Each structure stands twice: as C-alpha cells, then as structure tokens.
Amino acid sequence: MLTDRRKDRFLEVIAKRQKDFTIVIENIWDPHNVSAILRSADAVGIETVHLLYTIEEAPNFKRVGKKSSSSASKWLEFVYHDDEEGCISSLKKEGFSVFASHLTKHSMSLHELKGTGKIALIFGNESRGVSETALELADGAFYIPMVGMIESLNASVAAAVSMYEIMRQRLAAGTLEHSQHSDEEASNKLEAWARK
C-alpha cells in the first residue's frame, strides 16, 4: 500500500525529473561502475539513460543491483542502442546537443558546457574511452579540469562530477523549479512507481 508520505516523496521526485538532460553509457563493462553512474543519474534528476553497447554486453538489471531496494535502475527509464549512429542521430533529432567526455586538444572544459538546454553526455569504456565513431558524431567533447598529478578519473566518478556540474547550472538558472511533466504524465509515473 502506498502511504501518503511515500506518495508525496514520489511526486516530489517526479516533479524534478528532467526530460532534457540525459546520458549515454557506452560499453562500460564493470557493473559497479554502471550502478554508481545510475545512482548519480537518479540523484541529479535524469529521467532516461541511453545504453550504447556495441562491444561489451549490455547490463542486465535483473542481475546487476536490481535486488537492492536502493538500486537506481528501477527509478530510471532506459533506451538500448547497438550502434553509435542510431543512438546519437536519434538524440539529435530530439533536439539534444551531444557531448562526449574525452580529452583532446579541441575539448572544452566541463564548465563551458551550456547545461541548461537539451543536453546529452556520453561516457565511454573504462579503458578505451568514448569510441571514435561516437566522437565524430558528437557535437563536441569536454574534459574535467584537474590540478593534481593524475590526469583521469574512474568512469563513475567522472560521470558523477559531470552530471553534478549540469545540475549546478540548472539550479543556478532556476530550471529545476518547474516540472517538465504534465499532470497526466506525473500521474502515470506515480502509478508505475507505486507498483515497484
């Protein structure tokens, strides 16, 4: 039975879910990294996560963390892709600007991204990074500014830092103050969540 307190919590979270901010997880194979990224995605209000798996096996959430009541996977929506062009072109058709987390001489700082518009961030495989095809198709690449000796972060940490920067920009702009869902959409999502 859905208590009033639980219902209020669901509605509060649904009101902050963002249709215009998404991420693409590309061939990240470690289930712990995937789970950590999903927890961060849930925490910043992302509604839909795109899973792009062309080499590695896509996560099976019945095996990966689904048993845990704290698992973020049950509160997120997923779109699966098996080719880079299909994934990125579909995002662009929906009006998303697509940026890959990748360090090159042409990459912009994470803080230069315009995070208040429709934006999709791609995070690549732990060892190979974002694929060359995805890099070519993306609107650009970004890096996380660092001042230490180590020049890279764990995949899930890099994703969390990046998502929280976009959230910071949205909080500063006040874009999280208004729900992106109609009353009907919120009601449908509430019903779906109540069954979980």
Image (cartoon, rainbow, N blue to C red):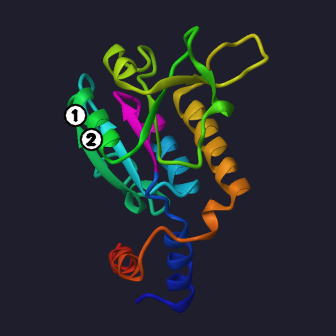
Task: Report which residue position mark 1 lands on.
Answer: 86
Residue visible at 38% across and 79% down? 194
Q: Position of residue 66 (x, y in %)?
A: 36, 55
Q: Is residue 81 left or right of residue 49?
A: left
Question: Which amino acid is tagged 1?
Answer: Gly
Magenta segment: does it hold 26? Answer: yes
Task: Report which residue position mark 2 lands on.
Answer: 90
Number of marks in the rendered image: 2
Q: Position of residue 65 (x, y in %)?
A: 40, 50
Give the vertical position of 180 relative to 151 (above or below): below
Residue visible at 48% across and 67% down? 180
Q: Nearer the viewer, residue 99 or 25?
A: 99
Q: Nearer the viewer, residue 37 or 61?
A: 37
Image quarter in which the C terminus is found: bottom left
Task: State the SS at label 1.
Answer: helix
Give the vertical position of 179 relative to 128 (above or below): below
Q: Is residue 165 left or right of residue 20?
A: right
Residue visible at 73% across and 20% down? 146
Residue visible at 31% across and 17% down? 133
Circle 2/circle 1 CB separation < 8 Å: yes
Question: Which amino acid is tagged 2?
Answer: Ser
Q: Outermost residue, right direction? A: 147
Mark 2 Cα-neighbour bin, 10 Å: few <14, some 14–19, many ≥20 = few
Give the vertical position of 20 relative to 15 (above or below): above
Q: CA distance from mark 2 to mark 1?
A: 6 Å
Choose top left, top right, bottom left or bottom right for residue 77.
bottom left
Choose top left, top right, bottom left or bottom right for residue 26.
top left
Q: Which residues are magenta?
A: 21-34
Mark 1 Cα-neighbour bin, 10 Å: few <14, some 14–19, many ≥20 = few
Label placed on residue 124:
none
Q: Position of residue 172 (x, y in %)?
A: 73, 54
Give the vertical position of 6 relative to 139 (above or below): below
